[in-house]
Amino acid sequence: MSPNVTAFAIVFAAAILFFIWSVYRRFRLIALGQPDNRFDAIGRRIWNMLFFAFGQRRVVKRTFGINHFILFWCFIILMIANVEFLLHGLFSQQIALSKLPDGTYHTLTTVFDIVSILALVTVVIAMGRRLLFPPSYIDAKSRDAFFILSMVAMLMIAFFGLHGAEIANGVEKAEDYMPISNAVASGIFDGVSTNSLDTWAETFWWIHAIVLLGFLNYLPYSKHMHVLTAIPNCFFKSLDKVNTQPREGFKQGNSFGAGQVSELSWKGLFDSYSCTECGRCTDICPATSTGKKLNPRLVIHDIKVNLLKNESVLTNSGKQVSLPLIGDNHEGSVSEEVLWACTTCGACMEVCPVFIEHVPRIVDMRRHLVEMKAKFPEELLTFFENMEQRSNPWGIAPTERIKWTADIEVKPFEAGQTEYLFYVGCAGALDSRARRVTMSTAKILDTAGVSWGILGKEELCCGDSLRRLGNEYVFDRMVQENIKMFEAKGVKRIVTQCPHCFSTFKNDYRQYGIDLEVIHHTELIDRLIKSGKLNLKSERNGFGNIVFHDSCYLGRYNEVYEAPRHAVASATGHDIHEMHNHLDKSFCCGAGGGRMWMEESPGQKNINVARTEEALANNPKTICVCCPYCMTMFEDGLKDKDADTNVQVLDMAEIVAESLK
Amino acid sequence: MLVVTCIKQVPDTTQVKVDPETGTLIREGVPFIINPFDIHALEESLRLKDRFGFRVAVLSMGPPNTEVTLRKALALGVDQAILLSDRAFGGADTLATSKVLAEAVRRLSEQEDVGIVITGKQTIDGDTAQVGPGIATRLGYQQLTLVDNIENVDLHANKITARRKLEGRHERVESKLPVLISVVRSINRPRYPTVPMRLMAEDAEVILWDNQVMGLDPETIGLNGSATQVRKIFSPERDKGEILGDGAADLGKAVQLLVSKLVEKDLLHI
Ligand code: SF4
Ligand code: SF4
């Protein structure tokens, strides 16, 4: 079937021009973002794109994602059919699939026929899910979603209508190769006159053409923008596992953090176009699930809305942005309450199928609040001052850092004399509970004959919380001091017992060009076990049932999952019990991102209580952690649940130390 | 009109130990901080700037490294920072210190009317609470010590209404300007510097006034001008503590024991 070429050419040209204009308008805004190099390591990037976009690796991690996987590939295949459809409409004499050799043509028509029915089925399933089993974490009944699903369905229906009519009319030479269209021909168009069949075919052709062009033009104005941006977004994805924030240049005249949308990196803006509104981030966010106002999907959504609403102001250079990026209670602004609720646990980024980077955006905005406005929750003032004056969160005198060494002999770190710097950390040195973990770690290292030393009174904080809270200026000063000290003392290998120190030295400090070999105590201890340096009882002892908690900064951020599990199993002779949310789906204890130093809002459920409940569901005698913050959070959680007399919280090092023969 | 804040850089006393042999403070490696009371004085002066449009000058007498502390004040938003530093000022007691500070305020008042001088209630190293009143006396200013709220400043009537926090009571007082105010910590919550302000402060000018500028008689200032001298510093002997009862076995009983002991020693009234 060929339409009236002139009429179609006009419609086509108008549609394409409008599409180009829309896309130009959208992408012009992206260019207003701050520089961010996402064009390095092209090979790896292409691989990521193939694996995650075309392979849909993250999409299919959830069962329902398979439906999307099928629809995605139907789309890709039907793209060939649709391009041919449009070109044939314009150049009916020159371009037609039917001009291909019969074998090829027949294969293609079969494929298109089958794929179209598959697409229709997936669309019906998707609609059914939204209507009958709406998941809580998405806006299931959104008009946008139904509109686009209906469009896809109409495209498929028009496809079958067109080909059915043509087959019934005897003008489709591949009729035997199109089972569905053939069924439509015999089921619906049987006995219809040639004239009417022509009209039907022409009607379906036009429906197909208009819906197709309409679909294309609708994309830039809806969440289905992701059809255009999700694939490149996988290409641009951060190559590091950890989305460490970029450093800031502390020069006069600079502005810090993001107080308006154009102060975000262009990738941050591109992210906002790529959100599929799948709601997986919302579903997994510990803040959202405990009733906080933070919803990671909406943070990204607000960035997009802000960008679009400020379009005219942003493009007519010179004027100020009219809708504030950080503000209260309206679409397009992210509230301060939301920004401070994030634990930077990274769960949202771990599940996002298109690699949207929520945490760096949240920290960008926190930076603006702290650095430009000096505006933050009250409790942080003391925290910041303690950090600046005494380089620890509590403001305890640095001389106290060696208190734990009172009864044991500990060497100071000296290059050449001691191999590892045991970086004890603020909690490990100053918190009475965490000090016991420090002692256990020291005991294990000594038993295994590891050569190690400490910085003692000279040790400073690593600065983790400062960075996550957006106080980059003080963080930057702290890093420089630490690096100066490490270099002066010749520190090369560091073992830490806190995942925050671990991740910060390992990932954040790298931005300063220092080459450190950083290892977490769980990894080192496990290595010692595996190499036979530790003699373990392999008995349950008094540990009973051990349930294990994955720390975000150890697991998700640095992929240390196996070491602590193996070490505990070796020490006790029994595998740990997994919580419902574990490994990369682990649920934060609530202390990350500087939340350790903030109050939870009254009237809302505490994240640590929620996680403690999850642990208690396994009936443990022991909750095993690998982080001093998690330790505090679980101990508090147990008190809250009145379970602290029956259940204990132990660090993995304590379990191993107690199991030494 | 000017508000002048006097601040002092002190060793972080929680980290200072006394050398029992020599009877001196071990200051090595101990960081310097702004005297905690003075942080509130500084904040209050900035609030006066915000509320009534004063200009704020900050004074600090001390060794050259006091500049660091003055830059912190600049980062918080003071308009002018003056470092009073000279060997001749060294070793001063409260008498000699107030003399230098008073002279500096007087010099400032030659350029611009001084309405209010603010100090912290006391410093954590000397704990005398004398320098503020000393300045007021020398300058002939009114003085309101232990202020925990400045209710109003009436620039037309030239007066201030403030609240003083005394043992078990408050006092609402009115005074003529110029006045010296010493503040307690509960008067405000200090602000936090923004980064642009910190960067500005890194390059801002800290004015140095040494004794050439000040022109004070060397016999009346510093160690020479001090009426008191420290002979010895020592940690007082402390009796060994005592463990009361057995808290682990019976917490309630242990608490009761503690309460009765406190009552006995007249430290608690029930
Ligand atoms: S990092 Fe964690 S707390 Fe923050 S938005 Fe993501 S899932 Fe929620
Ligand atoms: S940000 Fe990612 S995970 Fe969250 S709704 Fe959008 S696409 Fe889904």
Image (cartoon, coloured by chain):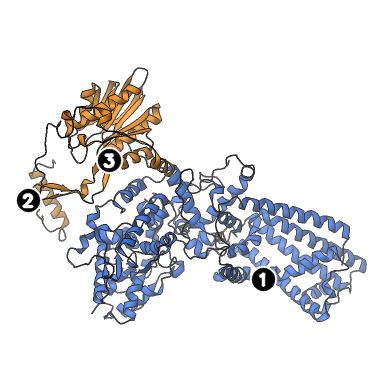
Chain colours: A blue, B orange
Mark 1 is surrounded, within 10 Å at the Cα level, by few (under 14), some (14 to 19) or many (20 or more) other residues, namely: some
Query: From the viewer's perspective, is residue A537 above or below residue A374?
Result: below
Q: Of the residues under marks 2 and 3, which one precedes in the sequence?
A: 3
Whole-percent x and y of residue A62? 55, 69
* Residue B239 circle label: 2
Give me the chain letter of mark 2: B
Query: From the viewer's perspective, is residue B70 above or below residue A455?
Result: above
* Disc 1 target residue: A73
Give me the chain letter of mark 3: B
Whole-percent x and y of residue A531? 33, 81
Is disc 3 on the same chain as disc 2? yes
Q: Is residue A384 left or right of residue A42?
A: left
Mark 2 Cβ and ligand 1 under 8 Å apart: no
Whole-percent x and y of residue A265? 55, 53
SS under mark 2: loop
Q: Residue flagged by tag 1: what amino acid is it?
A: Trp
Mark 2 touching mark 1, by CB under 8 A? no
